[in-house]
Amino acid sequence: MSVQSFEAFSVATLQEWLDLPEGPPFFEWEAGRLVVIPSPKKIHQKIVGLLFHALYDYVARNDLGVVVMELDVALPNGVGYYPDLAFIAKDRLLHLMGEDNKIHGALDMVVEVVSPFTQSRDRVIKFQNYYEAGVSWYWLIDSETLAIQEFEHSPEGYLCRATISSGTLFEPKLFPNLKINLPMILGVQPER
């Protein structure tokens, strides 16, 4: 497998970002420039993987749509992200999945696992860009404390619908009857 250097990529548009070869390295497209995605830590990948499994099972069992992990998303506001997890409702799936097997449009839900390195991008820049693009639900999961925040799109901005501390049962508004206890899923003790 050959890995091209960062300097080898001359990207001036969102479409050129979508046409990049599969990584590594991985990039997002923001404010007209490539943003290198850092390699995640083990806890980040564990959270993403196990939460994907829980969401995937729930969504499939209830025939709601599809949950995807780390897939390129071209948002309608010209931003290109590579979210940790995303949900697309069944009735929008054909509209949003492109022939290139990438997502084109505003998602029904995005989950970003926040690390100390990604705090400002996830909580400020992506927060604003996902809102402007019309992403309906945005979840932020702190990789250190396992706290979860659930935001819903509204005309006034994202409204915080839930802030769940580690060890507290999370019952997402988007998915009725789904209950998530993140520390239990991960097999760790909640922070006190």
Image (cartoon, rainbow, N blue to C red):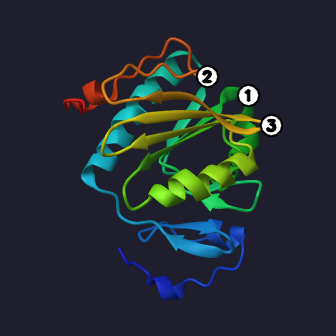
Mark 1 belongs to which amino acid? Asp
Name the element at disc 2: loop
Residue that mark 2 sits on: 64
Foreground tag (2 vs 3): 3
Along the horizontal axis of the image, is 165 left or right of 175?
left
Q: Nearer the viewer, residue 187 or 74?
A: 187
Quarter placement of the C terminus: top left
Picture residue at 33% right of the left edge, 29% below the top: 182
Q: Is residue 72 visible?
A: no
1 vs 3, front mark: 3
Labels 2 & 3 near each other (Cβ < 8 A): no
Query: Vertical placement of 128 versus 90: above or below?
Result: below
Q: Residue visible at 48% across and 51% down?
A: 70
Which quarter of the rendering shows the N terminus?
A: bottom left
Amino acid on which the number 3 mark rests in the picture: Pro
Residue located 43% across and 40% down the image: 141
In this rendered view, identify the residue nearer to me: 156 or 109: 156
Residue 101 falls left or right of residue 27: right
Label 3 packing within 10 angstroms: few (<14), some (14-19), many (20+): few
Instruction: Classify mark 2: residues with Cα within 10 Å, few (<14), some (14-19) or many (20+).
Output: some
Residue at the bottom extreme of this rendering: 7
Tell me the residue that label 3 is attached to: 155
Mark 2 or 1, nearer chain start? 2
The tag earlier along the polypeptide, 2 or 3, is: 2
Name the amino acid type tagged 2.
Leu
Q: Secondary structure at mark 1?
A: helix
In the picture of the structure, the residue carrying the numbered disc 1 is 91
Q: Quadrant of residue 24?
A: bottom left
| Figure check: 25 above or below 71 | below
